[in-house]
Amino acid sequence: MQSTPSIEVVDLCQRVTDSSGVLDILSMVSFTVGRGEAVAITGSSGSGKSTLLGLMAGLDVPTSGSVKLLGHDLFALDEEARARLRAQYVGFVFQSFHLLPNLTALENVMLPLELRGEPARAAATAMLQRVGLHDRLHHYPRTLSGGEQQRVSVARAFVQKPAVLFADEPTGSLDEQNGRIVTDLMFGLHGELGTSLVLVTHDAALAARCDRELRLAGGRLVSPDTPGLRAAAV
């Protein structure tokens, strides 16, 4: 029997109204993400990529359409229930790291486990060792390089062994070498843990590491939702 997809997006629309009228940010977007699959969402600036990611994670509510996350209809839940679902099953990696400045690297990685009431120190220490930061456990974010901060962010995202990880331009603020290190870490952990990975990116090399690429233009999905599309187009 086929398992339920990690994510099901159906006819998703997001509209905003300003002084010039109604603007369609997303229009009738539909696709699925399978369990353990890696999907890149690409497109030019303003195409709706980050808006789509936020809706898929239940961080915002659409004008119409639906998103099911691990079989849960996100917008049939209230904000508190969506937050509980994210805390249990979802990890995030952002371009700007989003580390808490008053916490050490170890404390930042411990946080999602502590919020779930789970033992945290040993797991967080092991995950920081996994991303090559065993000698930075007690450093604060301001004393870490950009690449090191993003590795802490990756460790924090994966320490709870999420079913789904959302990453918004995870290499966007890094140089080529650190971008490659972070990419290798994300895909290594994705493979080890079977996490479904959804990446918003402008980085063609990062998108090429994914199983599929979904391209947005003007809020619409313009690449067919078909495995192997990119390979067939080369």
Image: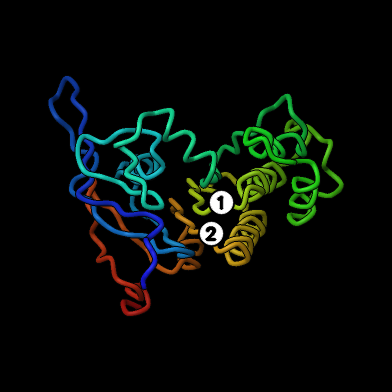
Furthest residue toward front: 1
Scheme of image coloration: rainbow
Furthest residue toward right: 135
Labels 2 and 1 touching (C-beta < 8 A): yes
The residue closer to the viewer here, 152 or 85, is 85
Furthest residue toward top: 19
Q: Which quadrant: the N terminus?
A: bottom left
The residue closer to the viewer here, 123 or 223, is 123
Q: Which residue is mark 2?
A: 195
Q: x, y percentage for residue 203? A: 48, 57
Q: Which residue is mark 1?
A: 162
Q: x, y percentage for residue 195? A: 53, 59
User: Mark 2 to mark 1: distance in Å?
Assistant: 6 Å
Residue at image location 60% in from the left, 62% down from the top: 193
Residue at image location 37% in from the left, 45% down from the top: 56
Q: Which quadrant: the C terminus?
A: bottom left
Q: Secondary structure at mark 2?
A: loop
The amino acid pointed to by label 1 is Pro
Q: x, y percentage for residue 18? A: 19, 22
Nearer the N terminus, badge 2 or badge 1? Answer: 1
Q: Is residue 37 above or below residue 27?
A: below
Is 192 placed left or right of 110 in the picture?
Answer: left
Residue at image location 26% in from the left, 36% down from the top: 62
